[in-house]
Amino acid sequence: MFLTRIGAFFLDMIETLVIALSIFLVVYLFFMQPHQVNGQSMVPNFQSGDYVLTDKVSYKTRNPLRGEVVVIHAPEAAHCPQGTGCDFIKRVIGLPGETISITDNSIKINGVVLKEPYIPTDFEILPGKFMLSGAVALGPDEYFVSGDNRPYSADSRTWGPVQKSDIVGRAFFRYWPPQTIGVIPEVNYP
């Protein structure tokens, strides 16, 4: 009788563990995924070592919006080590069909300066090697993404626009460090 109880207990534990692991895998593969911010490209709004949850479902039903923070698969031009699954966290700046240019220390969308309240006014905004030839017209499925730390970010200014298929998802919640836990705020452009 004692051995039967112990056996039943361990069987229940294994069953619970398998169910919990199955639920975790489904959520991780299809709904949301944790990501770590590596590097300084999103300073001052995100620090290296911050952890965010990425919503992998939203962009299956709608397109990314300007100002949303997204996780993207690193483009080939980023030269990430082979097989590392290198992802970047960036902000959506330009949308499909728009023309992006960088002049007078500002980003222009279709010739109009994009006012970015989340960027310190003393940050220098340079075109990068991809933008040196001038304005870039985005294709029907292309997005222009940039780090918030414009002087020190490799982004679409360096390696060009990203395809919607390269966007992993929308970063929506920061869960580390504890003093910054919360929903990532939406940007309202003036």
Image: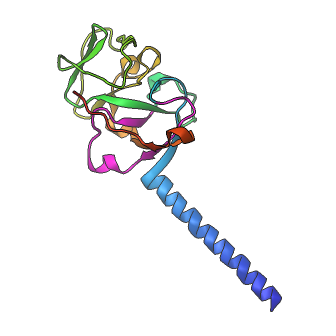
Quadrant for the N terminus, please.
bottom right
Q: Is residue 153 above or below residue 29?
A: above
- Residue, x 40% and y 20% (percent of image)? 159
- Residue, x 29% and y 39% (percent of image)? 64
Quadrant for the C terminus, please.
top left
Is 180 or 61 nearer to us in this picture?
180
Residue 177 shown left or right of residue 59 in the figure: right
The answer to whether residue 179 is magenta is: no
- Residue, x 22% and y 33% (percent of image)? 140
Answer with the quarter of the image where residue 65 lies. top left
Which color mode does the image show?
A: rainbow
Which residues make up the magenta segment? Answer: 46-73
Q: Is residue 90 above or below residue 157?
A: below
> Measured from the top left, where is residue 7 in percent x and y?
76, 82
Residue 21 shown left or right of residue 151 in the figure: right
Residue 61 shown left or right of residue 31 in the figure: left
The answer to whether residue 63 is magenta is: yes
> Measured from the top left, where is residue 103 in percent x and y?
27, 9
> Measured from the top left, where is residue 150 in percent x and y?
41, 17
> Measured from the top left, where is residue 100 in percent x and y?
25, 19
